[in-house]
Image (cartoon, rainbow, N blue to C red):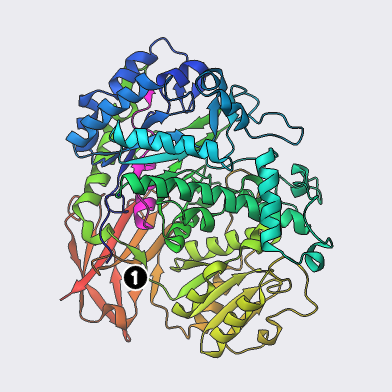
Amino acid sequence: MATEKWFDAGNLRWAWWAWEPDYAYRRQGNCMGTVPAGAHWLADWYDRIHAEETVKKMAELGITCAVTHFHKGFGLKHEAEGIRRTKELTKLCHKHGIRVFGYVQFTSIYHESFFKEVPQAKNWIRRDEQGKYLCYSDEFYYRLNGCFNNKDYLNYLKKCITHGVKYAGLDGFHFDGAHARPCYCEVCRKKFRQYLTRKFPQPLERFGIGDFSCVEIPPEASINTHNENLPAGESPLHDPLVQEWVRFRVDGIAEAVGELRTHLRKIKPDGALLSNPGIPRFHNTAAFSGDYAYAFGKQADLLWAENGNVPGVEDGILVHQVEAYKFGEAVGYKVMPTVWYHRKEGIRLPETAPEIRLQLAECAAFGGSPGVNWALRPKEKGTRFAIDDKALAAATGDYLNFFAQHPEIFLGSRTVTEVAMLYSFPSITFNYQKSYLPFLCMEQVLVQRRVPFDVVFAEEIGKIKNYRLVILPNVVCLSDDEAKLLLEFVKSGGTLYITGECGESDENFRERKNGVLESLRKHPRVTWRPEIPEMVDMPRLDVPKVPLSPQADNIVSEMEELLKNENMIKVKAPEMVAADLRRSGSGVLCVHVVNYRNDRNAKGINVTLRKDLSAGMVAHYFSPDDSTAKGGKVVAQVKSGSNCRYSLPSLATYGILVLTKE
């Protein structure tokens, strides 16, 4: 495998360590991320955050990385004392084997202090359509948004990176809020015209105009004009200028992040860039905020998955974060999940040991970097941390230290599968309602029916040759080149499972006279279901609660027929148990199983592996929930034809079947 990095999944176990400096809390006055920002006792809690006693305790729990405050957007001079405290905390963390990410707000400028330090920054602020300053939100009127297309602003962020490395000794940087509403400043207007001119030297056929010299950025409402009843960014986007405006914004934010990482690597070759683009979330992130996992992930080392997709069972629906992990694995970045429980009175963090175990289990099982965004939050007026709860600390320590003790399982882990699902940017961005929702529903079928799968982004569609079955859930938009590769894939022996109106439009959502895959409708290695059997109705919520399709078993049976019932793995288990087949960087084959309804044990779990995977192997079962299985215990195998079947012990939350050569 490639050279191991300190921030690789399997090495990194992180903790939130107060992203906001104390003056940011005081400026806000009210609650910020469950921290009562205006409390008189805030300073006492904040001092304890920086104490060596706290660092030592977190290291003993298995934490290897802290994400803490550095530059919130007040200005380097104003924040000098806060940065000094970051420097001292970093020294303590390094002493106890913990690396440190410094938090930097990607767009926030607290103008009340920043403009005093950097008067020219008044020219760096993002503008709305009327030319007014854009701020973080109406509530945060004092947090203006810097424009990442402005080189002067980007250079200031580079200056922050340099200061963080050379003065504070930081190992990496967390750029939060790396998403933005559209900007209408002069820099963006000019760059948009240049982008169009460079990309489309002959625009008449696509746009109906001869050049772009008088083009203006489309109004923000243009992403919603077709259906006022749909949430922001969910209307079909047919306007070619709007489509390219979305692509321009996606490219711009990704390029800015890439430029920051390049600067970091010049001054610290092993430095890591972590960022929070707010993906995946249950809205059209590319259209609404310029974020797209493929483009953004190519420019960062690690991405947060910050959302409300808290793993568990709600209203009989399995809620999970699997999409985030599949995206990261497909693109090549590491995923750090920081999820929030949403309730009527606001957000909350995990409060019970089972909730903590499930969050950590899902992350580890699907290849993420597990950690705790709740542990150092204040309790009882700052006299205690959440992690001071003995039951929560025990659950955290058991899991994190279990991960640390088994690098042969977790380091370099990747899904082993012959099944992939295609993700098409134009389909999901320009036809969000009719393409993203089927993608989510098909994903739910695969997760709940325990079918290991990968995601292939259409930008790298050539990777489909690595699979036997490729799924296209209403991928309406396909380019001619993409269609050609799919046709060649089938011709060479591959199989396709297609739903909906696949290939009816080109990559710019222009309807074709004939679909480019029409010749495959009756092909023996293709199953085409125009009725989109995976699709179900779901509530319009910020958190995607996706019910399982009533056709789930039929869908999986049809896929098995395409694979000639030669599946690599079959897992029989209770309804709310998920599984993934993975191989670690050391070559160890593992079956990870997670019980999402972990208020009760899951029994009767059987794993059947194909002969080529199980022949000559001995199986051991590991679980952080079972003291007798932490070091592994032998699991008997039963021959089932040419395959091998393994019966797993009763599952509390998380178990791993590990196969090694006899």
Label 1's element? Answer: strand
Please state if 201 lies on the left or on the right of 165 as rendered: right
Q: Amino acid at mark 1?
A: Val
Residue 304 coordinates in the image, percent (x, y): 45, 45
Label 1 belongs to which residue?
A: 607
Q: Is residue 37 visible?
A: no
Tell me, yes or no, whether the highlighted magenta stretch contains residue 364: yes
Q: In the rendering, at what x and y percent does residue 500 appear?
A: 69, 71
Magenta segment: 354-378
Report the number of discs: 1
Q: Quadrant of residue 376?
A: top left
Please indicate whether residue 182 sits to the left or right of residue 368 in the image: right
In this view, the residue farthest toward the right is 208
Q: Quadrant of the N terminus?
A: bottom left
Considering only vertical position in the picture, is 112 above or below 59?
A: above
- Pointer 1 local density, CA inside 10 Å: few below 14, some 14–19, many at least 20: many
Does residue 521 appear anywhere in the picture?
Answer: yes
Residue 372, given in percent of the width and then of the height, sits at: 35, 38
Q: Is residue 38 above or below residue 367?
A: above
- Residue at left 37%, top 71%? 416
The structure residue drawn at horizontal position 71% and vertical position 57%, both measured from the top left corner, is: 243
Residue 520 location (% of width, % of height): 65, 85
State yes or no: residue 90 in magenta.
Answer: no
Which quadrant would the C terminus be assigned to in this image? bottom left
**Residue at left offset 57%, top offset 45%:** 543
Specify whether 131 is left or right of 607.
right
343 lies above or below 428: above
